[in-house]
Image (tube, helix red, strand yellow):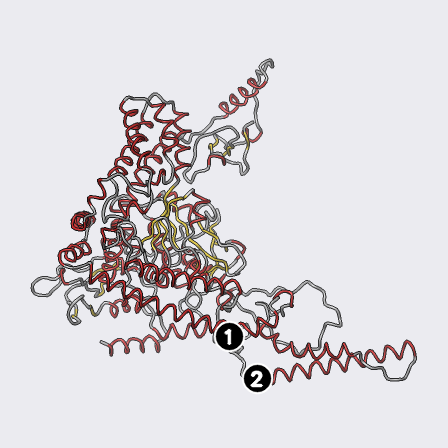
Amino acid sequence: MYYRIIQLHLTLLLQPRKTTVDEMLKLKFRWNKPDDGPRVKRQKSQQLTLDSPEGSETSSRPGGGYDNDRDVNGTFKRPWDITKIPGYNQTYVNEASLDKFAAYLKEEEVPVESSTPVSSEEMLPLEPVQKEYITSKHDWTPVFSVLKNNNSVNKRKMSHTALKSDFKHYLDMYDKEEKRRRGKSKKDKEGSEGDKTKTKEPKELVRKSVFSSILGVFSIFSKTKDGRKLKRDEIGEGIGFWLMRWPALFFIGMWLLFLTTIYASVRVLVAGYENILTWRGKRAKLRKVLRGARTYEQWVQAAQDLDVELGNAEWRENPKFGYYDHVTISKLTKMVRKLRLQDQAEDLSNILQGCIKNNFAGTESSTLYSQTYYGTKKLVEQWNEELGKAVTYVLESPKIDDEEKRDLFRLYSKNFGKSALCLSGGGCFAYLHFGIVKAMLDQDLLPQIISGTSGGALIAALACTRTDEELRQILVPELAYKITACWEPFPKWVFRWWRTGARFDSVDWARRSCWFTLGDMTFKEAYQRTGRILNVSTVPADPHSPVILCNYITSPDCLIWSALLASAAVPGILNPVMLMNKTKSGDIVPFSFGSKWKDGSLRTDIPVDALNTYFNVNCSIVSQVNPHIALFFYAPRGTVGRPVSHRKGKGWRGGFLGAALESMIKLEIRKWLKFIKAVELLPRFVDQDWTNVWLQRFSGSVTLWPKIHLADFWHILGDPWPEKMEDLLYRGQQCAFPKLLFLKHRMNIEKRIRSGRQATRHRKRKLEETDVCDLVRKTFSESDPDSDVKHSFVFPALMAPRSAGTDISSSNSDYDHEPQWEMDEGDSFLTADEEYPTTIL
């Protein structure tokens, strides 16, 4: 096997041609390793037919599976069938768009010259320097720089000999300058006064010359990106910073390493304590059944059995609990039920205005769902059910007119807010998000608003560009055949990194991501197709520029695949890229004046604040798979659907001493990371503040932590195979199952409010010219009843040809992410040929 791998790598390296995907897949799926037992060679008789865009070809892509997919003879019961995936034989690649994208990446940036005038005294007769033109394709070039004239510049750290030579060069240069200035000063004085005696140079000038010579050595460490030397007021660090920075960083780093070691030891002791003292006998068997559940129904049954064994079922019957107002909820449940049964719509609608709020009386507190494996207080479940019935009753009641209903549901939507699914980055760990999306989709609980960063953006794009039926057919193990981002052999990665500073090629990744985005689909087009709102977090290459959350509001015509590349541009993995915009004519041009963007995980992995600003999101369901964050996840009092394993969920995980020690060490680590960020001790490698990788917000209202295996780190930058994808789907669903009840209660109210908004909204219609004139005539007559208005008011814009009608749009004061077709006072409308709004007076 290894001989075949080396042979193919040498073939790819020596042959000057592109490797076909068919050859790559033949190597990739030649061998299979089941869960148990030695490696087993696949059956040669299993064939899979694929239709490529150029024609139909048959390749040997055999199936596989776990041991339970084999019969008694050891052969597979079924091959992997990629034909079940919609669009499996399509690539959706627009070569013209990719060619323009590649052309813009290769365009050279013209260096901006400083407009500040320089006096003749400040000018030095320096030797001519060869200008370096760095393109957007080679921003992070740690070893080999590609220049315009094909000359290389060594950017490695200078040795002691080279530094000494450079220091001598500065001394000689400034000595020559001093001699030139002395000679010039001597000639000027002789010409003006006629004095032939020698003039002495002021001592201040000599001291300034020597001091400038010494500072010249440090100028190589204080230059801007364009080569301009920084001024002292731009740095403001002082000699103390240069003397203390590296020793302080060294000792703090050693202390952090020691704390991390102690933290890992505490976690191991807590895990051993739980396994030895808690999970024994029948409890261990029930937990094994719970973890082995393949469907949500199986998981619910196993969770209920485990709650009965642990004694958690009794807690649900008692309504008293200190983390919510059970007295208020009990009274309101009876009152709302009574008003609904007595058909008192007006009184019920008034009560609902005060009840429909985010986390009303603590009923959405995560602690209420952290005491049992399945379920919460019976009173909370009854309140949620009764509240949903009341919202539906108000919507269907004939005692409330449509205008009042519209105002009511608008108010309900503002107060209750919306839910969003946030998918984090994490390299190939992000494929665990597929299982999260599948679990929510199967229970019809997938939120309408989805955000993704880095690897999570790929899954978010797939979910927001496909309908529910298409997603159910796509989220299968055969999806692994469409994930081929890391198909190239290792030698090519090394050579590309040596050449460009990036492991992967941007254009190649753009071509392979087109299938997930349905080609050149924009954010606005994706929203119009599926009704889901896609959000992709990207960070500008300039560290001082603000972050942008790409969606159909901030960048409606931006191509989704370009945002995916920008969000995945990790330093050393992928170079910063330009966001591409689609014009009305269909042309592809750079977005935001050709600025370059990089990985959103570097600064905003979970954009909770931006989602709240744009879409009123106040309930964020976060799926977090970043390995450097997941390793520090610890819930001392349990989390939703995962109570503390001992003392019936009422104690501390690992005991109070273990929980206190874990929290203390983690807070100590965070304190020193904040200190490093505050005093700027950590160097800005590739112009990036790396402390944000640990100090930003990584959690939400409910946080899901899919289980990460140690073997996953070996494939952190690799493509999954069908068996691996099946395992990823299973682990993602297992992580989502405990949270679905919490999400179900939340979505029960949110969906009813959304239905009410859609039912009470005025539909989009066209206004004829006579309707507009009648509306204006009525407005003027109401404002001045004594006037005799009998003639028609005609606007020139409305008399233009081909302006048969106008589309009514919504008011900015009634902002909602769904299209608003009602017209209120102050609303505006556009004619078919107009580009500007005409306000109704």
SS at circle 2: helix
Give residue 813's position: percent from left, percent from top: 49, 35
SS at circle 1: helix
Give residue 664's position: percent from left, percent from top: 38, 61
* Viewer-side residue, 500 vs 425: 425
* Viewer-side residue, 51 vs 806: 806
* Viewer-side residue, 18 vs 672: 672
Amino acid tagged 1: Pro
Give residue 104's position: percent from left, percent from top: 50, 61
**Residue at the far left in the pictured view:** 72
Residue ID for mark 2: 162
Is residue 432 depicted above or below 769 in this figure?
Answer: below
Picture quadrant where residue 120 is located: bottom right
Q: Is residue 363 left or right of residue 726?
A: right
Q: Is residue 167 left or right of residue 412?
A: right
Q: Where is the N terminus found, in terms of image quarters? A: bottom left
The Cα–Cα distance between marks 2 and 1, rounded to whole angstroms, is: 24 Å
Mark 1 neighbour class, 10 Å CA radius: few under 14, some 14 to 19, many 20 or more = few
Residue ID for mark 1: 247
Q: Is residue 796 left or right of residue 616?
A: right
Residue 158 seen in render? yes
